[in-house]
Image: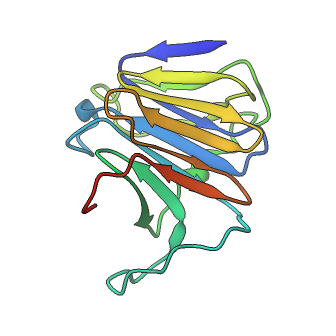
C-alpha cells in the first residue's frame, strides 16, 4: 500500500524505534524537500562526531541534496506515543503552510511507503529506506546498520 501527498508527512516504524518527517519547502524549516529520521536506540557504529558538534550525533539522519548524519539535540521521537506507533494502516499527514509543527506520529507498517514530491520512504524489516527519486540520493537506517547511497562528491 502506498500513501501519497504533496505537503508533508510524518511516521514511526512498527517497532517505535525510528521516527521520520518529510518537510516540504513550504514548512519554512528547509530550503528544499527534506526528510529527517531519528532513532531511539541503535547498535551500529556511528560515524565520527564532528568537532563542531556540541550535542548528540549518530542517531539523526537527513536527506536533502545529500544523505548525512546530523548533530541534533532534539528528536522527532518526542511526537511518538499519543497515537499507536504499532498501527499499520495510517500515517500522519500535515499541512506545513497551515501548521508547521508536526502532530502526533502514526505507524507506517512494513512494506508500506509514503511519497512526498520526489521523496519516497518505505518501512522495511531492515529499517527505513528513504530516496529522492529525482537525484538517486538516499539512505537506509535501522537498529543494527545504516547505508548512505548516491552521495554527491564533496558532501
**Percent of width and height locating residue 30:** 25, 45
**Percent of width and height locating residue 74:** 48, 63
The residue lying toward the viewer, choosing from 118 and 103, is: 118
The residue lying toward the viewer, choosing from 148 and 93, is: 148
Q: Residue 43 falls in which quadrant of the image?
A: bottom right
The residue lying toward the viewer, choosing from 74 and 140, is: 140
Q: Is residue 148 shown above or below 51?
A: above
Residue that appears at 79% across and 34% down? 86
Residue that appears at 58% across and 39% down? 129
**Percent of width and height locating residue 155:** 28, 61
Q: Is residue 71 shown above or below 123?
A: below
Residue lying farthest to the left in this orientation: 31
Residue that appears at 43% across and 36% down? 22
Q: Quadrant of the N terminus?
A: top right
Q: Is residue 83 left or right of residue 133?
A: right
Q: Is residue 148 left or right of residue 127?
A: left
Q: Is residue 25 shown above or below 50?
A: above
Q: Residue 31 falls in which quadrant of the image?
A: top left
Amino acid at each position: 500500500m502506498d500513501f501519497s501527498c504533496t505537503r508533508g508527512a510524518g511516521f514511526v516504524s512498527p517497532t517505535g524505534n525510528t521516527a521520520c518527517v518529510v518537510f516540504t519547502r513550504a514548512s519554512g524549516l528547509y530550503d528544499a524537500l527534506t526528510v529527517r529520521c531519528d532513532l531511539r536506540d541503535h547498535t551500529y557504529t556511528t560515524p565520527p562526531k564532528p568537532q563542531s558538534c556540541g550535542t548528540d550525533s549518530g542517531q539523526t539522519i537527513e536527506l536533502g541534496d545529500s544523505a548525512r548524519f546530523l548533530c541534533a539535540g532534539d528528536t522527532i521521537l518526542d511526537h511518538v506515543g499519543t497515537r499507536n506507533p504499532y498501527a499499520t494502516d495510517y500515517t500522519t499527514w500535515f499541512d506545513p503552510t497551515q501548521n508547521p509543527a508536526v502532530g502526533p506520529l502514526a505507524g507506517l507498517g512494513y512494506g508500506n511507503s509514503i511519497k512526498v514530491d520526489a521523496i519516497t520512504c518505505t518501512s522495511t524489516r531492515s529499517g527505513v529506506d528513504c530516496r529522492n527519486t529525482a537525484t538517486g540520493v538516499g539512505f537506509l537506517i535501522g537498529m543494527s546498520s545504516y547505508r548512505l547511497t548516491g552521495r554527491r562528491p564533496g558532501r
